[in-house]
């Protein structure tokens, strides 16, 4: 199987910057996607194809990629950004196309 | 309004089967692939499989092959996910999620529209 590894938790004060990493061997070859999930709700796509932002997603959400790690950055964190965040990608051969990362809980202090 | 409406919560005994529905509205049902993703309590997201609502072809995650069946009814714009031989570890919220890609192309394997989820509880 293929694994995408995220830190379990990230804590940040309001107005500061939160960075969430996702590591996987195939990330240099495969796009990554990021979802935000608030308690009791379905996930919402916040970044696609490493760094593209869907319409309606605030500009404070951005994505980047470097080697085997992709990063979701939330600039000027707001209380409403407290949620779980999941990366998603695929292995290099496409055998495992819909793999999700382990998830990161973002806590706004 | 573009939305996916899922069926209500289910309680099943171990060994039984469950069939969850997901009704699409507000867009052309056969134009977008549909996926199923589940989430056990307090756990992460797990991709289960994909169905092409246009032709009905499917592909399942290895973990679920032999136990899961995904079907669709184009007359009602509804996709179904049936999971058999249920065990306690199958207790989870099951989501349908729409692929961003048109069915005339290959799936993109990411999702721009989700249902609200269906809780399936497996308990004796």
Image: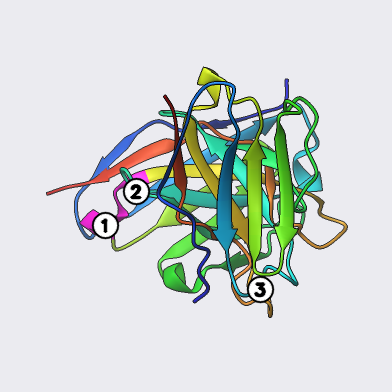
Depth check: give the residue in front, A23 or B16: A23
> How far across and down, in percent of the image, does residue A108 sit?
46, 26
SS assignment at label 2: loop
> Is there one chain holding both mark 1 and mark 2?
yes
Classify 10 Å Cα crowding around label 3: few (below 14), some (14-19), many (20 and above).
many
> How far across and down, in percent of the image, does residue B58 sit?
63, 64
SS assignment at label 1: helix
- CB under 8 Å between discs 1 and 2: yes
Instruction: Determine which quarter of the picture holds residue A90.
Output: bottom right
- CB under 8 Å between discs 3 and 1: no
| Residue B89 numbered tag | 1
What is the quadrant of the N terminus of chain B in the image? top right
Q: Earlier in the sequence, mark 1 or mark 2?
A: 2
**From what the image shows, is residue A101 above or below residue B62?**
above
Which marked residue is nearer to the observer: mark 3 or mark 1?
A: 3
Residue labelled with disc 2? B40
Q: Is residue A104 left or right of residue B5?
A: left
Does the image show residue B73?
Answer: no
| Residue A26 numbered tag | 3
Classify 10 Å Cα crowding around label 2: few (below 14), some (14-19), many (20 and above).
some
Instruction: Determine which quarter of the picture holds residue B114.
Output: top right
């Amino acid at each position: 199987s293929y694994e995408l590894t995220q830190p379990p938790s990230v804590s940040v004060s309001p107005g500061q910057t939160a960075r969430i990493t996702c590591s996987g061997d195939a990330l240099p070859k495969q796009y990554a996607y990021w979802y935000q999930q608030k308690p009791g709700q379905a996930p919402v796509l916040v970044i696609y194809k490493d760094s593209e932002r869907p319409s309606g997603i605030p500009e404070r959400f951005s994505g980047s990629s470097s080697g085997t790690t992709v990063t979701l950055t939330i600039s000027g964190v707001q209380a409403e950004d407290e949620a779980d965040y999941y990366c998603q990608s695929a292995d290099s051969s496409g055998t495992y196309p819909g793999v999700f990362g382990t998830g990161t809980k973002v806590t706004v202090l | 309004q573009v939305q996916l409406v899922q069926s209500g919560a289910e309680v099943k005994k171990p060994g039984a089967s469950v069939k969850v529905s997901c009704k699409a509205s507000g867009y052309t049902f056969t134009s977008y692939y549909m996926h199923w993703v589940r989430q056990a309590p307090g756990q992460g997201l797990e991709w289960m499989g994909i169905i092409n609502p246009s032709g009905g072809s499917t592909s399942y995650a290895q973990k679920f092959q032999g136990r899961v069946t995904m079907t669709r009814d184009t007359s009602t714009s509804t996709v179904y996910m049936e999971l058999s031989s249920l065990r306690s570890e199958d207790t989870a919220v099951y989501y349908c999620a729409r692929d961003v890609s048109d069915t005339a192309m290959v799936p993109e394997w990411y999702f721009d529209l989700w249902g609200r989820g269906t809780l399936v509880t497996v308990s004796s």
